[in-house]
């Protein structure tokens, strides 16, 4: 279980670096001079997805390690006000989208 | 961080010259809260409401917005007094679940606050499910259904609103500072703490009149369920490393019931919660033959786990929660419920293309944790949550004696502790200032204590591959951002240097060794949670041999320095835990503390096993049970 950073999407804003409850992220300066997010050690991720929620450009993808049955699907989340739009893309290109609303309580 | 430091300057904090090299930031406040999780944030809110003039500082290792146990969210409040029940009922339930080893006074005082803090949470913005009459919809007789995805940002925002509350994010506290009264029985009094900025490397010297310890419990002591790539996919936060226990032990504070470990029953692999399925859709525990087995072992928290362990050991595993057959609509609700607290489980269902309506959900026990929010492990406190060190209070997972706290119980304890701190400071003020000479002498002693801790930081950093000392320069570890425009930071000082020595071991190696020894000799997953007295002796010796190795670990930057301290904290907690396991010569709780040499419960052990760290050894103290209706105050 861990995250992958899509550096082409990363704006280098540092929001994920600040929010990670394990201080697992850092900003690295690329040869172009641009700052990009990097994971210190991908084995240390708890899977809380705080960084996904904080990222405004969906540059962070969440995946399950092979030791947990992961097969390469990647999850991202886009947030607009109370709505979170969770997107799971499988390696074969198929996709599932689930929306959650912060105003609705869990029914179970 | 930059913002924090700007705040610090504006509020007039100064640098202090530390003998030796460099400087550290000195921060004076009335109340220092160590850890800005559930209890820490709420404690700050209550304190500031009670007395807005109090200078409150939260020192948080990460960022309070998502730090602690609630990072991903939570989808139920598991401790609430529903209509027709009384606080006494909840206290009685928790006491019974702990087989009599809990504090009657702590459970009752906590239970009395559960509904008030719940209403307060709702006012702060938490969404709680209501029925058609506008009353909270309940799950069982003590649970409420919520949308808790944003519960931590809500608590963080409440803490930030305090008039004189400062949030210092990314500050890792490693040591308490204290003064001792005159004479052999002189009162030890809390006076502050020492730590460092995890991202920027600045050293911090906090002075406070009272301290609220709210660091949470300890994970990562034992080899985890997924020991490889997904090693941090565990139930409890892998970033809760037992710092509060370790600092308390070092300061001589008394701990209780560490031997009552917590082992969660969870969804296989993802280690996601099972309560949502078990209670939400009434899924029963079944073995691979489809037999419902939970009734055979009992329904206490530890018995539900024990049953699963036994079924597996008897060859009737894997075990499952029977969900197959639920409606597609229920399945979709579960997908959303898990996204609001444990997104990995929803991802797993979607990735597998097999949901809980089609396949039962496999379950397993986690590695053992020390966590006072679920069991009775932690600081030995009085009914006001005062520890055995004057001015040091504890709340949440770090505080002992009150199991089954969950979120609302942690808030309740934070409230009780905050109100007690306010009262304590008031009394102190009325008692008048101490003699100036004594204050000066104390200040010198405290500076000495902080410097000793900074020296440990410098030592680890000086062993680092690229430390400044290797290049012949002064250690530039702790430069204050306010002091200079072109500030150097700890990380910047870690440029590669010639002649860097390669340290013999690194943090990972020692952590793996610790987790292996605990797993094999102190009742981890690999030994079905059982241990023997002889095995515990081996564990004690092996953990003891790792401790000096940890002192020689090298840090290249402040983040690595934090990793070293996390390991050292865990090792100290392991040592105390082993002593507790060894002391309780019975098996009162299946799996949680299963002593193969003493496989039955004994009335002789209807007492608390407490401990203090004295002269490098864990000293065990047994104390009589504080029953329902009784009250406990510190006397010795």
Image (cartoon, coloured by chain):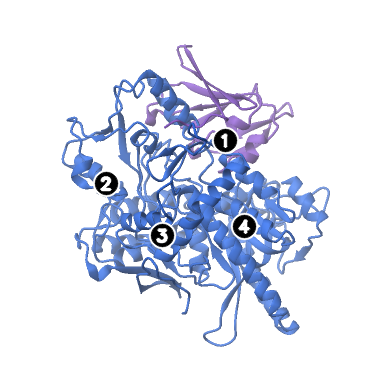
Chain colours: A purple, B blue
The residue singled out by tag 1 in the image is A50
The answer to whether marks 1 and 2 sit on the same chain is no
The residue singled out by tag 2 in the image is B299
The answer to whether marks 1 and 3 sit on the same chain is no
Are dots 1 and 2 in contact, CB under 8 Å? no
**In the displayed structure image, the side of residue B591 where residue B369 appears, left or right:** right
Chain hosting mark 3: B
The number of numbered badges drawn on the structure is 4
**In the displayed structure image, the side of residue B81 where residue A34 appears, left or right:** right
Query: Regarding mark 1 in the picture, which secondary structure is present there?
Result: helix
Say which of A36 and B44 sits in front.
B44
Dot in front, 1 or 4: 1
Dot in front, 2 or 3: 2
The answer to whether marks 2 and 4 sit on the same chain is yes
Disc 3 packing (10 Å; few <14; some 14–19; many ≥20): many
Dot in front, 1 or 3: 3
Q: How far apart are marks 4 and 3 (CA)?
A: 36 Å
Q: Position of residue A56 (x, y in %)?
A: 66, 26
Q: Where is residue B472 in the image (x, y as percent from the top left)?
A: 70, 57
The residue singled out by tag 4 in the image is B462
* Residue B212, numbered circle: none
Extreme residue in the front direction: B133
Q: Where is residue B134 in the image (x, y as percent from the top left)?
A: 52, 36
The answer to whether marks 2 and 3 sit on the same chain is yes
Disc 1 packing (10 Å; few <14; some 14–19; many ≥20): some
Chain hosting mark 2: B
Residue B472, compared with residue B139, is above or below; it is below
Residue A89, compared with residue B570, is above or below; it is above
């Amino acid at each position: 279980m861990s995250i992958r950073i899509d550096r082409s999407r990363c704006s280098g804003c540092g929001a994920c670096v600040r929010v990670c409850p394990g201080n697992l992220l850092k900003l690295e300066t690329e040869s172009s001079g641009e700052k990009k997010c990097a994971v210190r050690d991908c084995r240390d991720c708890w899977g809380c997805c705080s960084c996904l929620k904080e990222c405004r450009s969906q540059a962070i993808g969440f995946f399950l390690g092979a030791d947990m049955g992961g097969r390469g699907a990647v999850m991202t989340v886009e947030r607009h006000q109370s709505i979170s739009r969770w997107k799971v893309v499988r390696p074969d290109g198929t996709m599932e989208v689930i929306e959650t609303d912060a105003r609705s309580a869990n029914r179970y | 961080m930059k913002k924090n430091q700007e705040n610090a300057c504006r509020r007039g904090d100064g640098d202090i010259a530390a003998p030796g090299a460099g400087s550290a930031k000195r921060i004076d406040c009335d109340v220092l809260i160590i850890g800005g999780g559930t209890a820490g944030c709420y404690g700050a809110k209550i304190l500031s409401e009670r007395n807005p003039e109090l200078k409150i500082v939260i020192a948080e290792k990460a960022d309070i917005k998502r730090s602690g146990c609630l990072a991903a969210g939570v989808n139920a409040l598991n401790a609430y007094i529903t209509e027709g029940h009384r606080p006494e009922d909840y206290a009685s339930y928790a006491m019974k679940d702990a087989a009599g080893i809990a504090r009657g006074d702590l459970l009752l005082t906590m239970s009395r606050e559960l509904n008030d803090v719940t209403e307060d949470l709702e006012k702060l913005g938490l969404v709680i499910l209501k029925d058609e009459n506008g009353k909270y919809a309940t799950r069982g007789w003590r649970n409420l259904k919520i949308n808790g995805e944003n519960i931590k940002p809500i608590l963080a925002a409440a803490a930030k609103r305090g008039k004189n509350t400062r949030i210092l994010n990314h500050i890792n506290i490693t040591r308490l500072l204290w003064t001792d009264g005159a004479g052999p029985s002189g009162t030890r009094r809390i006076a502050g703490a020492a730590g460092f900025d995890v991202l920027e490397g600045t050293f911090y010297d906090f002075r406070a009149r009272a301290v609220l310890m709210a660091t949470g419990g300890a994970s990562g002591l034992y080899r985890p369920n997924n020991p490889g790539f997904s090693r941090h996919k565990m139930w409890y936060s892998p970033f809760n490393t037992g710092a509060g226990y370790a600092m308390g032990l070092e300061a001589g504070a008394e701990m209780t019931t560490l031997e009552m470990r917590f082992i969660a029953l969870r969804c296989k692999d993802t280690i996601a919660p099972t309560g949502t399925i078990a209670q939400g859709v009434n899924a029963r525990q079944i073995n691979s033959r489809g037999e419902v087995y939970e009734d055979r072992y009992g329904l206490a928290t530890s018995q539900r786990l024990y049953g699963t362990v036994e079924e597996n050991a008897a060859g009737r595993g894997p075990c499952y929660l029977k969900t197959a057959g639920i409606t597609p609509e229920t399945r979709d609700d579960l997908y959303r419920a898990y996204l609001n607290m444990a997104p990995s489980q929803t991802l797993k269902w979607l990735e597998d293309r097999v949901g809980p309506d089609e396949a039962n959900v496999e379950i397993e026990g986690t590695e053992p944790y020390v966590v006072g929010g679920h069991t009775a492990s932690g600081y030995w406190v009085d009914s006001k949550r005062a520890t055995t060190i004057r001015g040091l209070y504890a709340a949440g997972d770090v505080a002992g004696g009150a199991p089954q706290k969950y979120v609302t119980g942690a808030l309740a304890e934070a409230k009780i502790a905050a109100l007690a701190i306010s009262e304590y400071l008031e009394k102190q003020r009325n008692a008048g200032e101490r003699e100036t000479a004594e204050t000066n002498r104390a200040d010198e002693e405290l500076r000495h204590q902080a410097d000793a801790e900074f020296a440990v930081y410098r030592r680890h950093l000086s062993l680092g591959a690229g430390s400044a000392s290797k290049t012949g320069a002064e250690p530039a570890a702790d430069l204050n951002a306010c002091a200079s425009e072109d500030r150097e930071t700890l990380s910047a000082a870690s440029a590669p240097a010639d002649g860097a020595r390669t340290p013999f071991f690194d943090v990972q190696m020692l952590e793996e060794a610790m987790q292996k020894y605990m797993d094999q000799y102190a009742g981890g997953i690999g030994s079905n949670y059982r241990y023997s007295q002889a095995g515990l002796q081996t564990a004690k010796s092996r953990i003891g041999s790792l401790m000096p190795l940890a002192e020689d670990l090298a840090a290249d930057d402040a983040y690595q320095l934090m990793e070293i301290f996390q390991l050292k904290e865990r090792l100290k907690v392991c040592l105390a835990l082993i002593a507790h396991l060894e002391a309780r010569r019975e098996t009162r709780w299946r799996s949680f503390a299963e002593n193969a040499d003493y496989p039955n419960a004994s009335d002789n052990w209807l007492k608390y096993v407490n401990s203090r760290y004295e002269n490098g050894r864990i000293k065990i103290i047994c104390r009589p049970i504080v029953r329902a209706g009784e009250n406990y105050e510190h006397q010795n």
